[in-house]
Every structure is written in structure tokens, then in C-alpha cells.
Amino acid sequence: MVCTTLKPGIECIFMKKTGCSYSGGKCFPIVENCEGCARVVEFETGKYCSTFPYPAQKWQKGSCPMATHLKKASKAEEQKINPLKASKRAAGKK
Ligand code: SF4
């Protein structure tokens, strides 16, 4: 159903005829780590994640698996690792 509480207009599985069925009857706002993520949506009620009702929980065990703003960082790490692998491979062929 479409949310009528904190994220008006957003389709949400927790919204029921009786109201929001999520823990406590409402979503939780984004956390600092979410800043820059494309899933952040700003409402009059505050900034919320369009995917998760409790963003802080998604960062408790490392990085949020749905974060859109972390891909560039991981690609940069890959690029740092790849030249090393390449040089090791080259050294192994000698
Ligand atoms: S997808 Fe993850 S990082 Fe992005 S806003 Fe939601 S909880 Fe935050």
C-alpha cells in the first residue's frame, strides 16, 4: 500500500489498512553513512531511505548492501589491487 505517514506517496510493504505495521509504527530516518546514496528521499517529515525502513540497521554489520554511493569506492579499490595482481602474474611467468 502507499504510505500515508512519514513517506507519503511511496509504495511500501509495511503499510496496511490499519496503518504502518513496521516496528513502532514508523520508519527511521537515514543515518550519516547514507548521505550521498541515491535511495535517500527527502520528505517534509525528513530524509528517509526508499528501500529500508531502518537504515541504521543496514550499517551495523559493515556497509549497507544497497548503498549506491559506495560502488565507486570499491571500483577504485579494485583498480588498486589489479596492478598488483598483474605484476605478480608477470613475475610468476619469468
Ligand atoms: S540504501 Fe542503504 S545507504 Fe542508501 S539510503 Fe538506504 S540504508 Fe542508506
Image: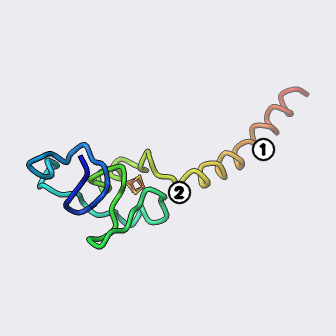
Q: Nearer the viewer, residue 16 or 62?
A: 16
Please tell me which residue is depicted at 51% across the width and 53% down the height of the picture: 68
Relative to residue 12, is residue 35 depicted above or below?
below
For label 1, the SS is helix
Mark 1: C-beta under 8 Å from nearest atom of ligand 1: no
Q: Quadrant of the C terminus?
A: top right
Q: Position of residue 44 (x, y in %)?
A: 29, 73
**Residue 40 vs residue 1: left or right?**
right
Would you say 62 lies left or right of 77 here? left
Furthest toward the bottom, the residue is: 44
Colour scheme employed for the rendering of this structure? rainbow
Which of the 4 image quadrants contains residue 30? bottom left
Answer with mark 2 or mark 1, whichever residue precedes in sequence: 2
Q: Please name the amino acid that badge 2 sits on.
A: His
Residue on which the image places disc 2: 69
Residue 81, position as x, y percentages in the image: 69, 44
Is the residue at mark 2 in contact range of ligand 1, meaning its CB lies under 8 Å from it? Answer: yes
The type of residue carrying mark 1 is Pro
Give me the residue at 53% from left, 57% from top.
69
Disc 1 target residue: 83
Quadrant in which ligand 1 is drawn: bottom left
Is residue 91 or residue 6 the one in the foreground? 6
Q: Front-most of 4 and 13?
A: 4
- Residue reaching furthest left? 18
Identify the disc placed on residue 52: none
Residue plotted at (44% across, 47% down): 66
Nearer to me, 41 or 1: 1
